[in-house]
Amino acid sequence: MSAIKDAAASMESHGEFGMQALFPPGAAGALKHDRVILYPHVHRDIGLGITLKVAEILQQWAKYVVICPVLDDVGDMVLPSSNFKIADFEEELPNADMVITFGGDGTILRAARTAAEYEVPILGINMGSKGFMAELEMDEVELVSSVATGAFEIETRMMLDAELVRGGQIIHRDFALNDVVIRGYNKVIDLSLFGDGQMISSFVGDGAVIATPTGSTAYSMSAGGPIVEPTSHNIIVTPICAHVLEAKPFVLVSDRHVTIEIGHEKNNQAYISADGCDRIEIYSGDIVNVMKSQKNTRLVRLSGRSFYSKVSEKLRER
């Protein structure tokens, strides 16, 4: 936070650019206040070169463009001099109409955790490795001009809510766009999985991934789970390195209430994590409930690239 404020103090803020509206009246993709947040991962877009290029494209139509860098663990990194406002993401988001991320899928996941609260759509520019959720690659940034004419669609992705119950009390709540992971730290754990109270599977293994269709191409896929079309509404339950042949992935309808009980057979250290964020320790006897969230992530689509072609392309990459 201090790094952002220090950078903001040293740069001139443009505020309102006084340009024409970001979307013409009646445009299919018209937004409310013409305010766009650029959310770059500073270790991906080093020097913010791509971010500033996009900012210059947008200022031809947008009334307000602000840069909110991801600055965690970058020490005293100095941001380049710019005429664009530098600000804190969470402070700017309530009044934003669109977020454009610069990084990998992790950057989109991070933005989505806050953007979902305000139903702000996200346009991802891939500067990471796979980038299944990102819409544009670095050499396609000129396409962001399409938002000015409303030549884009909003794709809604389901999310998951998770709660950790201990001794009959809910002690932790979280939500995820990709997945909720339950895993042992260094040793196997004992898990029983239920759907609406009915046994799905019981096994000893490294853990389990409870994923959305969006998350089906992430950890769940690596653990042997199926690839599911990301706009569908399902919950994917994937065991991680189970020590029984019968423990297989299951694709459930989205209104199932998934329960994971941590057994006593292998009383080893374990944790729960939503979208790879904070690891919360869990113990034998704990219960994790996972269900479809009322929140959704809204992703901007404008390239015309299909999910199938994207999967084929990304899975061929090393």
Image: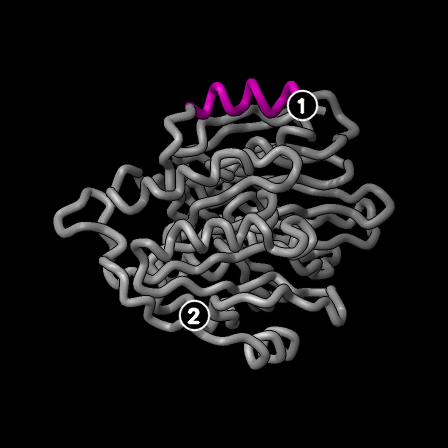
Name the residue at 45% across, 25% down: 307
Q: Which residue is mark 1?
A: 317
Name the residue at 69% across, 53% down: 43
* Residue type beneath disc 1: Glu
- Indicate the quadrant where residue 163 lies: bottom right
Query: Predominant secondary structure in magenta?
Result: helix
Which element is circle 2 on? helix
Q: Which region is colored magenta?
A: 306-316
Q: Nearer the viewer, residue 114 or 149?
A: 149
In the rendered image, residue 183 lying in the magenta stretch gets the answer no
Q: Which residue is mark 2?
A: 92
Which element is circle 1 on? loop
Figure check: 258 above or below 119 = above
Relative to 153, 139 lies left or right: right
* Residue type beneath disc 2: Glu
Relative to 128, 161 lies left or right: left
How far apart are labels 1 and 2 at the CA level?
A: 36 Å
